[in-house]
């Protein structure tokens, strides 16, 4: 892993709820889906399961997927599944909305799913698209 390349870290002037709402719309406009719309607000999710977090805890873990691409990819090679969950983290820190997204370089992808020559390039396209959707939402 190459932290400076693989971890996408940006700020938004929008509030966490506004960024999340705008990002969700952009994701859907690009044929992706938010798999966990009902559970991405971690304050609500933690509290629903007995967890205790402060009232100002505002982490959202947004899981996105493109079913029309993932279906073919995972049918072709289920070993790819370990790299398929895509989470965008959104939270506030020091009065600013922070966005974090972890992706992987082609070499790392090839190491994790060897003997699958087409997958690194395909997944890199998805990683790039997610970063551009983050930029559009911010």
Image (cartoon, rainbow, N blue to C red):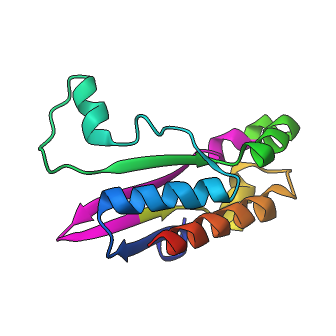
Looking at the rendering, in which quadrant would you find the N terminus?
Answer: bottom right
Q: Residue at x 58, y 48 (%)?
A: 64
- The image shows residue 38 at horizontal and vertical percentages of 43, 34
Q: Which residues are magenta?
A: 80-99
Above or below, 63 against 1 in this view is above
Q: Residue at x 22, y 29 (%)?
A: 47
Above or below, 97 against 123 in this view is below
Does the segment drawn in magenta span residue 95?
Answer: yes
- The image shows residue 94 at horizontal and vertical percentages of 17, 71
Does the segment drawn in magenta span residue 41?
Answer: no
Would residue 134 be found to the left or right of residue 40 on screen? right
Would residue 15 be found to the left or right of residue 1 on screen? left
The front one of 134 and 108 is 134
- The image shows residue 69 at horizontal and vertical percentages of 79, 48
Above or below, 14 against 112 in this view is below
Report the predominant secondary structure element of the magenta stretch. strand
User: Toward which corner of the image does residue 43 lie, by quadrant?
Assistant: top left
Looking at the rendering, in which quadrant would you find the C terminus?
Answer: bottom left
Above or below, 83 against 19 in this view is above
The front one of 26 and 94 is 26
Q: Residue at x 65, y 58 (%)?
A: 29
Q: Residue at x 48, y 76 (%)?
A: 4
User: Toward which corner of the image does residue 71 lie, by quadrant?
Assistant: top right
């Amino acid at each position: 892993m190459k932290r400076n390349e693989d971890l996408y870290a940006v700020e938004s002037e929008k509030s966490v709820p506004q960024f999340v709402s705008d990002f969700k719309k952009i994701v859907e406009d690009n044929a992706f889906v938010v798999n966990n719309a009902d559970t991405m607000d971690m304050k609500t999710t933690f509290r629903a399961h007995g967890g205790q977090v402060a009232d100002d805890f505002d982490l959202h873990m947004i899981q996105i997927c493109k079913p029309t691409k993932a279906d073919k990819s995972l049918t072709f090679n289920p070993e790819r599944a370990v790299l398929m969950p895509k989470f965008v983290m959104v939270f506030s820190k020091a009065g600013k909305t922070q966005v974090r997204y972890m992706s992987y370089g082609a070499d790392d992808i090839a190491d994790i799913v060897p003997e699958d020559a087409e997958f690194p390039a395909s997944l890199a396209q998805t990683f790039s698209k997610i970063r551009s959707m983050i930029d559009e939402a911010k």
